[in-house]
Image (spheres, helix red, strand yellow):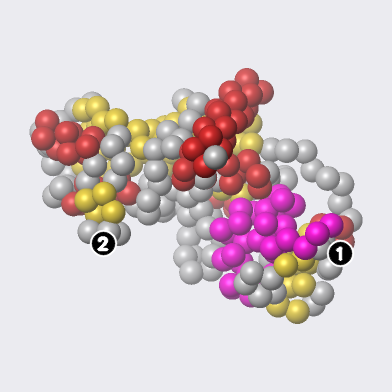
Amino acid sequence: MEPIRLNKYLSEQGVCSRREADRLIEAGKVTIDGRKAGMGEKVTGQEKIVCDGKTVGQGAGEKKVKPVLLAVNKPRGVVCTTSDKDRAMNVVELIHYPVRVYPVGRLDKDSEGLLLMTNQGDLANEIMHAGNFHEKEYIVTVDQPFNSAFIKKMQEGVELKELEVTTRPCKVKALGKKTFQITLTQGLNRQIRRMCEALGYHVVTLKRVRIMNIHLGRLNTGDYRRVTPQELEELQWQLEQARMEREEEES
């Protein structure tokens, strides 16, 4: 096998996403032939690679696991990272799934709702690809009643000075005096909270209810389910369409 970056190798082995792999490498939790791995290092898969105490690849002595894609209803107070910086329970510990899976993207500690988890690195990277404009839908409650001007500004895009960016236009629908539904096609850090704060509002509750064609539905808080074959087929079709459109724009 041609040498590839360690974070990509760990992703392809179903250990974690590339982003999470970088965090683990930086934290000194990945070794190659007994020594701590360095950021950006390349491997062939012939080495003895240990990630967070578990052997990866040919040295693992395990059969290749079947692909897994889960829909999880993450509770508030649970984190998506396995970093030691936050002592809160992480979502991997929460579901305690028999096969090693990891989050596709993130949902911050104070937010709840739909989170996808998988052992497929390529699938995770496709879903998280910012250029694909994948839809994510949320139900949000703020601390005070809003008006039509607030909805209009949220829809048209909000300037986030601290990130030096204006958010993409999005779909917003009022559901009550303080509650609205919002559908984003980008995933800036704490984006909805930042958008509301920029307009003088504070988010009280934030719940993600859909990622692309996968819906949270009536899944209980803290529970998970396997994504159905029909959902997976539709998801892969949407990803393929986005990939083709991206390639056309780049050619």
Q: Nearer the viewer, residue 1 or 184?
A: 1
Q: What residue is at 66 percent from the left and 47 percent from the top?
A: 121
| Residue that appears at 22% across and 51% down | 159
Q: Secondary structure at mark 2?
A: loop
The image's mark for residue 162 is 2
How far across and how far down the image is residue 146, in percent? 12, 36
Q: Which residue is mark 1?
A: 46
From the viewer's perspective, tell me whether residue 13 is left or right of residue 101: right
The question of residue 135 being in magenta is answered with: no
Q: Which residue is found at the position 32% from the left and 49% from the top?
A: 191
User: For residue 5, which quarter of the picture?
Assistant: bottom right
Q: Secondary structure at mark 1?
A: loop
Give left or right: position of 5 versus 246. Answer: right
Q: Is residue 79 shown above or below 240?
A: below
Looking at the picture, how far across and down is residue 165, in whole percent?
A: 28, 54
What amino acid type should be assigned to the residue bearing mark 1? Gln
Residue 119 against residue 239 in the figure, above or below: below
